Amino acid sequence: MINIIDAGLNTTVQDLGRWGYQDKGITVGGALDHIALRLANLLVGNPENTAGLEMTLLGPTLSFTEDALIAICGGDLDARIDEKSIKTWSPLYIKKGSILRLGSAKRGCRAYLAVHGGIDVPSIMGSKSTDLRSSFGGFNGRSLREKDELPIGEPHSFFSTYREQCMQNHGSFHSAKWSISYSGRLAYSPHPTLRVLPGKEHSMFTDSSIAHFYNEAYQITSASNRMGYRLKGAPLYYKTALNLLTEPVTTGTIQIPSDGQPIILLADRQTSGGYPRIGHVIQADLPLIGQTKPGDAIYFKAASLEEAYQALAEQEKQIKQIKRMIHMKLVKE
Amino acid sequence: MTYYQFFPLGEQALVISFGSDINKETNDLVYQVYTFLKQQRAPWIIDLVPAYATLAVHFDALQLLHHHNTPYAFVKTYIEEQLSQVSSMENAQQPHPIITIPVCYGGEFGPDLGHVATINDFSEEAVISTHSSPLYHVYMIGFSPGFPYLGGMHTDIATPRRDTPRTSVPAGSVGIAGQQTGVYPTESPGGWQIIGRTPLKLFQPESKTPIRLSMGDRIRFYPISASEFAQWEENKA
């Protein structure tokens, strides 16, 4: 069990999302930096889609009532165990009674905690992700609170061998000597450039608006959350008044309402929308958005479908290599 | 098959557009293609999302990248092939199910019924009978889990949205916004004029059929009294 001593700013249970129900109006959800969650899961020997914790800006304080193999990836939230700084992007064996505390974000915005066996909450419509807007999934359909008790799932067979090695260490935790290096981590930035594919209404914007869109900085406002980031910058206008039907949107869709200020739709977005779609952030760059916070600035850069697929394929190739490396290390260590 | 267009929705989804206005014929076409593609069960289709006049096909680009350099082009070709088959089935459509929804109009459940009556110069009883007589068509589900976009409301009871949206509208609330009517399956903020509430649970995330309504369904509302409403609630408890 993991006891929540302090819940932090917004800590939720997330996996890779609830697919297959968008036709019924169900939000996909899932980790905003899905790559960080996948890697954290791989580091503890879990399937990549296992439920972990998404921790935002100011992390939680957690007490473990049993030994656990954990890994933290994503933004740097100053993770400590019993006040000692710990290695992230690396597997770590934490002993019963130890306290894991995450602080405020030093870099990025969201960190992901994976636990061997996963966070054991019920799967609803094929996912353990928390749907905050409709209050279901995850832990009781809400963000974690003080005194919540999170069950940990059943360990796999390799856990016991790993455990024996770790028990020789007399501290409150045993950290692996290695960590993974993932190039996407270096791209976490308070002013990332996101590659964008044109949306269906792209050509309906004035030329000067299009020029602004690709050249100016757009600041992330405080009215931003897991549903979408609301940006502020040079306003973007349509050539003529538009009256659109409710049409499909996707994660990364950039909508422009009539005030001209962009909204980037994120994992907790609705399944359809009615604002003009100037573009869509490519999938490979979505994790970078999850690592930005209000006050940061975003730049947009035009991309082609081919570039989007190439970026996706390269990202995946790197994850595969890391996966192989982790597999060898975990078995050997 | 009639006229349609494709466009990409990012690199992981394709939208088939059958038109740009709300009409039953276009929407029936969307429904037909949606159900046809669903039956085909292509393993790389991860979501099919129908709207008024469009259908989004979300696909697993990573899976397709193993064999195709440009997954979008592959999906587009696949859909084109499928659409040519749909045309041959155009007359084989099953009638859509009719779902009846009990509504307790007015009172604490429908705080805006009086306003809808006044603004249209109707009695409250006339609003109720006008609202509960048509067979409504579910054009699409969106906005929130199970929220139906309904067509078929009589324009005599059309009422603009509230000037100030309510921060919370209870689940089951039945409302009017302009010429639209709908029912809120979950508690949510909303600016619709609320004229009644159904005791039916339209969204039950943990049940086997979490969502009761589907695109294409036909809906009829029928009035129930406050005591019948209480009875419904009790029977379910």
Image (tube, rainbow, N blue to C red):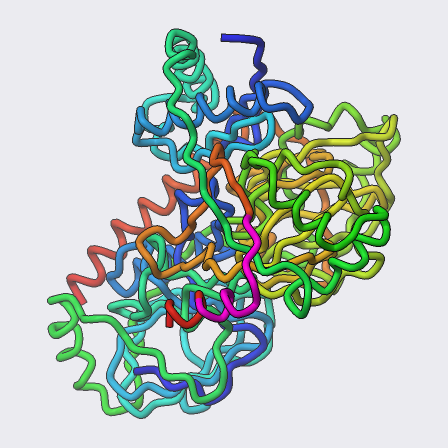
Residue B97 lies, in percent from the top left, at 41, 35
Q: Is residue A80 left or right of residue A159?
A: right
Q: Is residue A278 left or right of residue A189?
A: right
Q: Residue at x 24, y 83 (%)?
A: A67
Residue A187 visible within the image? no
Instruction: Tell how many labels.
Output: 0
Residue A151 lies, in percent from the top left, at 30, 77
Q: Is residue A321 above or below residue B79?
A: below
Q: Quadrant of the C terminus of chain B?
A: bottom left
Q: Residue at x 59, y 24 (%)?
A: B24
Residue A179 lies, in percent from the top left, at 36, 64
> Quadrant of the rendered structure where residue B224 is?
bottom right
Say if the magenta span includes residue B230: yes
Residue A90 lies, in percent from the top left, at 35, 67
Say if the magenta span includes residue A287: no
Q: Residue at x 60, y 25 (%)?
A: B53
Assign the magenta stretch its main secondary structure. helix
Residue B152 visible within the image? yes
Range drawn in magenta: B222-231
Q: Is residue A190 above or below residue B180?
A: below
Q: Is residue A7 left or right of residue A168?
A: right
Q: Is residue A242 above or below residue B129?
A: above
**Front residue (pair A237, A102):** A237
Q: Residue at x 56, y 38 (%)?
A: A282
> Quadrant of the rendered structure where residue B133 is?
top right
> Quadrant of the rendered structure where residue A206 is?
top right
**Front residue (pair A104, A322):** A104
Q: Is residue A238 above or below residue A193?
A: above
**Front residue (pair A299, A278):** A278
